[in-house]
Amino acid sequence: MSAVETPALAGASDTLELATFYVGDLLVGADIRQVEEINRQMDVTPLPHVPPFVLGVLNLRGNVVTVVDSRTILGVKSDIPARPSHNVIIRFERERIGLAVDRIADVVRTTTDAIDELPANFDSMDTRFLQGVHAMENELLLILNVQEALSLQ
């Protein structure tokens, strides 16, 4: 196994803290430095003529936040009904984006050396949105490439 060298992980300190959450049955993590806050699902106002991954917008203490569907972005199909319970608010470029997720997990501390490349057979997902994988004791943690995932047009 080799460590992943990606722009977001390369040059970072050896310690990496990840805010983790579930998208369907998948455990996904985002660099905690990119996460501004986590909140319960709020009323989202749908918008017309938006891409399918945009659920709408919400009012977060007077700020308009675009909310995107993590399942759609990652191409996750699940037996669990799609009822996101939380938003992971991420500071992306000059705005806040809410990533609708199914449930919140923990903060995971690891090292960049413990992040492995994605297996070549991950062809059922669009892997450009993932930076690597971390083998935990009981499950795998997929590392979200926030830049790619939220740069969708």
Image: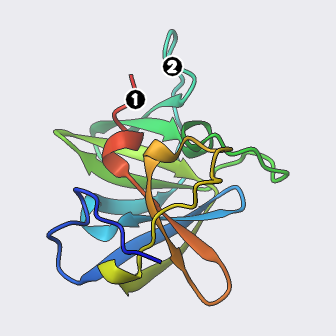
Q: Amino acid at mark 2?
A: Pro
Task: Name the residue located 64 percent from the left edge and 40 percent from the top edge.
Answer: 75
Numbered mark located on residue 75 in the image: none
The residue positioned 85% from the left and 51% from the top of the image is 79
113 relative to 149, above or below = below
Up/down of 61 relative to 31, above or below: above
Image-based side of 63 in relation to 68, left or right? left
Question: Can residue 60 be seen in the rendering of this structure?
Answer: no
Q: Identify the residue at image location x=70%, y=55%.
A: 24
Say which quadrant the C terminus sits in: top left
Residue 30 horizontal side relative to residue 75, left or right = left
On the image, the x and y values in percent for residue 17 come to: 33, 78
Kindly identify the amino acid type of the residue bearing the numbered disc 1: Leu
Q: Farthest residue in the top direction?
A: 49
The CA distance from mark 2 to mark 1 is: 9 Å
Image-quadrant location for residue 88: bottom left
How crowded pointer 1 is (Cα within 10 Å; few <14, some 14-19, many 20+) is rated as few
Residue at image location 58% in from the left, 55% down from the top: 120
N-term-proximal mark, 2 vs 1: 2
Which residue in the structure is indicated by mark 2?
51
Q: Position of residue 33 (x, y in %)?
A: 24, 66
Task: Indicate which label's residue lies in the foreground, 2 or 1.
Answer: 1
Report which residue position mark 1 lands on.
152
User: Residue 152: percent from the left, percent from the top?
Assistant: 40, 29
For the residues bearing labels 2 and 1, Cβ distance under 8 angstroms: yes
Give left or right: position of 65 versus 56: left
